[in-house]
């Protein structure tokens, strides 16, 4: 039996429409979109249509969208670019302790170039404290980088407030919208927004960086000068077409997706009565359920529950063996973090699948001789 797939934060199933959009570009229309001949121009036209479709789905006025190999590259371009163009005296980068490694590690790497890295703490709900943010963001700040929806616990950060603090201090604001694109309102006041196709039922291997009008960044990758000189390298028209098709679907599916996810969330809370939800219960995306149970060995549960595909946290850090930095930032002990699992569902998850998965997970957890715990 095929395992029930409940790891939507790691990646989403490819939409059939995205697959169909890619096939002709892989099979027949294989031109290099940067070539000047007719076949190349046809491929370039596909890329630009996709760029328009993704930009429209973002719903942010103006700006330009640069295609990248994924969100990690987009975030690196934004963070390193902002640091390189920073004015003298602006040597501080402010972010949140629960950010993805693509942000955390890049910011930390810049400390070797005399930048100060400030990681704002979060409360037990996983949200950044506005007062502490206001104290940290000052005239020495070059960039504030905050994700919209957390990839491990699903909480929605107050990005509009944080963007306002950044701009009041004369700093740039970067929004990691990888998990929030198509699921939560994007901040119209961001200077840069990073997104990824495979989190919205598009193909892996392509992402994007939206940059507001008037903001110029130095290139991170040099070469042929593609993407306006910011990101050299030959684009894949097939990946662009798949991303564009997935983005178009957001316009027609967004409301239905939200309603469906809400239904699944409410069902999930009843399926896991002996578990505790990690992070805010109110300010969150409901397609992410990160829960813990006293005495649980999450790694053992994951190994033994083979009929369900779920995770312990970020797919990018799953092989590190280290406790989740996100859960520890909430104040959880190493044992509590180790007893937590992440269940992610979305557009193609059925209620029957979720119920079957919930039964399997609970049965596997019960075999670990857990002590009783208060219900949610």
Image (tube, grey):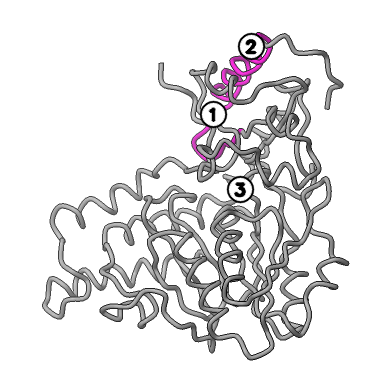
Q: Main secondary structure of the magenta part?
A: helix
In the image, residue 104 lies at what x, y percent? 61, 59
CA distance separating discs 2 and 3: 26 Å
Residue 161 position by quadrant = bottom right
At label 3, counting other C-alpha atoms closer than 10 Å, the crowd grade (few under 14, some 14-19, many 20 or more) is: many
Helix, strand or loop status at disc 1: loop
In the image, residue 142 lies at what x, y percent? 66, 80
Q: Is residue 229 left or right of residue 136?
A: left
Give the residue drawn at x 76%, y 76%. 164
- The segment highlighted magenta reads 343-367
CA distance separating discs 2 and 1: 20 Å
Q: Is residue 142 above or below residue 23?
A: below
Q: Is residue 176 left or right of residue 129?
A: left
In the image, residue 165 lies at what x, y percent? 78, 76
Of the numbered discs in the image, which one, if any, rests on residue 151?
3
In the image, residue 115 lies at what x, y percent? 64, 75
Q: Is residue 283 above or below residue 120?
A: above
Of the numbered discs in the image, which one, if any, rests on residue 350?
1
Task: Answer with mark 1 or mark 3, whichever residue precedes in sequence.
Answer: 3
Mark 2 lies on residue: 363
Helix, strand or loop status at disc 3: loop
Helix, strand or loop status at disc 2: helix
Q: Nearer the viewer, residue 363 or 93?
A: 93
| Residue 227 is at least partly visible in this image | yes
Q: Is residue 198 above or below residue 117?
A: above
């Amino acid at each position: 039996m095929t395992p029930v797939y409940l790891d939507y934060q790691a990646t989403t199933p490819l939409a059939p429409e995205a697959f169909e959009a890619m096939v002709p570009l892989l099979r027949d229309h294989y031109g290099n979109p940067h070539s000047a001949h007719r076949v190349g121009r046809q491929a370039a036209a596909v890329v630009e249509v996709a760029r328009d479709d993704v930009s429209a789905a973002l719903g942010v006025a103006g700006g330009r969208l640069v295609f990248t190999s994924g969100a990690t590259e987009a975030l690196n371009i934004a963070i390193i670019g902002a640091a390189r163009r920073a004015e003298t005296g602006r040597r501080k980068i402010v972010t949140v302790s629960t950010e993805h490694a693509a942000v955390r590690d890049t910011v930390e790497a810049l400390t070797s170039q005399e930048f100060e890295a400030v990681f704002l703490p979060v409360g037990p709900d996983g949200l950044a404290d506005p007062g502490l943010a206001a104290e940290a963001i000052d005239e020495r700040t070059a960039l504030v980088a905050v994700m919209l929806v957390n990839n491990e616990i699903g909480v929605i950060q107050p990005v509009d407030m944080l963007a306002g603090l950044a701009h009041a201090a004369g700093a740039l604001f970067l929004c990691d919208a990888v998990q929030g694109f198509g699921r939560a309102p994007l901040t119209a006041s961001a200077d840069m927004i990073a997104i990824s196709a495979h989190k919205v039922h598009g193909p892996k291997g392509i992402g994007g960086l939206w940059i507001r009008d008037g903001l110029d960044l130095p290139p991170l990758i040099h070469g042929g000068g593609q993407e306006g000189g910011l990101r050299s390298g030959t684009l894949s028209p097939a990946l662009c077409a798949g991303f564009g098709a997935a983005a178009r679907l957001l316009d027609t599916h967004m409301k239905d997706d939200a309603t469906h996810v809400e239904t699944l969330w409410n069902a999930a809370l009843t399926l896991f009565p002996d578990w505790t939800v990690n992070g805010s219960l109110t300010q969150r995306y409901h397609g992410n359920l990160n829960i813990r149970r006293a005495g649980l060995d999450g790694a053992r549960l994951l190994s033994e529950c083979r009929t369900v595909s779920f995770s312990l946290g970020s797919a990018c850090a799953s092989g590190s063996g280290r406790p989740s930095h996100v859960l520890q930032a909430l104040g959880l002990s190493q044992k509590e973090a180790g007893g937590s699992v992440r269940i992610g569902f979305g557009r193609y998850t059925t209620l029957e699948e979720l119920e079957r998965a919930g039964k399997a997970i609970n049965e596997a957890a019960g075999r670990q001789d857990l002590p009783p715990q208060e219900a949610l």
